[in-house]
Image: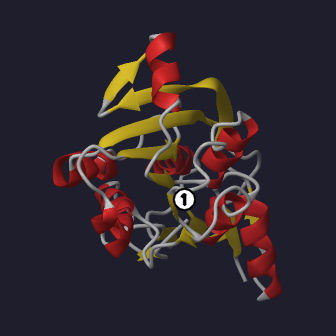
Amino acid sequence: MNTVWITRTEPGASQQADVLRAHGYPVMIWPLLDIEFLEPPQLLVNGDLVEDSGRVAALLSVPPRMVIALSGHAVRAAAGQGLLGDASAAIAIAVGGQTAALLSDMVTDVIVPAQATSEGILALPELTRLAAGDTVWILAGIGGIELLAQQLLSQYGVTVVKFELYRRVGRPQPPEVDAHRIGAVVIASQQGLNVFTKQWQDMSGSPLVPLIVPSDRVAAAAAEAGFVHVHIAGGA
């Protein structure tokens, strides 16, 4: 049996590998990205970067109506910097069960969408509890798709405060890997796909290798990059 290459960041990579190994799959863990936490985080309000310390302090003094966590990395960073102390009463939404488990240590009743994507969050009925003038915090990394913030702003008239708590940095390709012995590759994000595509080409890897991706959006990008067998897992 050929090896499954897990490219996502830790600790998710090892957790996923344990599950696959328990089902009999040989696994190689080699994350394509490293995580660098930002302290303090970058704050964007309705899409605009806020750098004035006085305004940042004012934003943090207003408890949010809703907190949306887009990754476990974001929750760890926010908790470590004490940002969630005033958010314990907020409606809490987390993408994926592992992110929800981390967030539940600080808030109660964490909601997990059926689809672990921005579209899945936007389909949640809990969003109808928002009113114009409410504040929504989004815990995330630098960059990424801005669909969620844009839709919250336009559809509900809320103030969207996005905390960019970390950045992803590309890693070198794994040493001495035989691309022909890789039977499938797990991709966790658009940025991870971009790094993988370049490295796979450098390895003379086949575009026929099965890719397991988290969303329709990443699947479309993989197909555009020339990969033929792309499978959507519905989450990282």
Task: Give how far across and how far down residue 26 sits, in percent.
Answer: 78, 76
- The residue sitting at 81% across, 74% down in the picture is 18
Query: Which image quadrant is residue 226 in?
Result: bottom left
Q: Position of residue 84 (x, y in %)?
A: 63, 44
- Residue 106: x and y in percent read 70, 55
SS category of the residue bearing label 1:
loop
Q: Is 30 on the left-hand or right-hand side of 199? A: right
Q: Nearer the viewer, residue 198 or 162?
A: 162
Name the residue type under label 1: Ala
Residue 172 visible somewhere in the drawing: no
Q: Is residue 49 left or right of residue 154?
A: right
From the viewer's perspective, tell me whether residue 13 is left or right of residue 89: right
Residue 24 versus residue 176 in the image, above or below:
below
Q: Is residue 38 above or below residue 102?
A: above
Mark 1 sits on what residue? 188
Is there any visible trace of residue 120 in the rendered image?
yes
Say few, some or many: other residues with alpha carbon within 10 Å of mark 1 (under 14 / 14 to 19 / 20 or more): many
Q: Position of residue 112 (x, y in %)?
A: 51, 72
Quadrant into which the C terminus falls:
bottom right
- Quarter of the rendering containing residue 162: top left
- Name the residue rendered at 56%, 45% in the picture: 199
Relative depth, front residue between 51 and 183: 51
Q: Which residue is at 51% across, 44% downward? A: 140
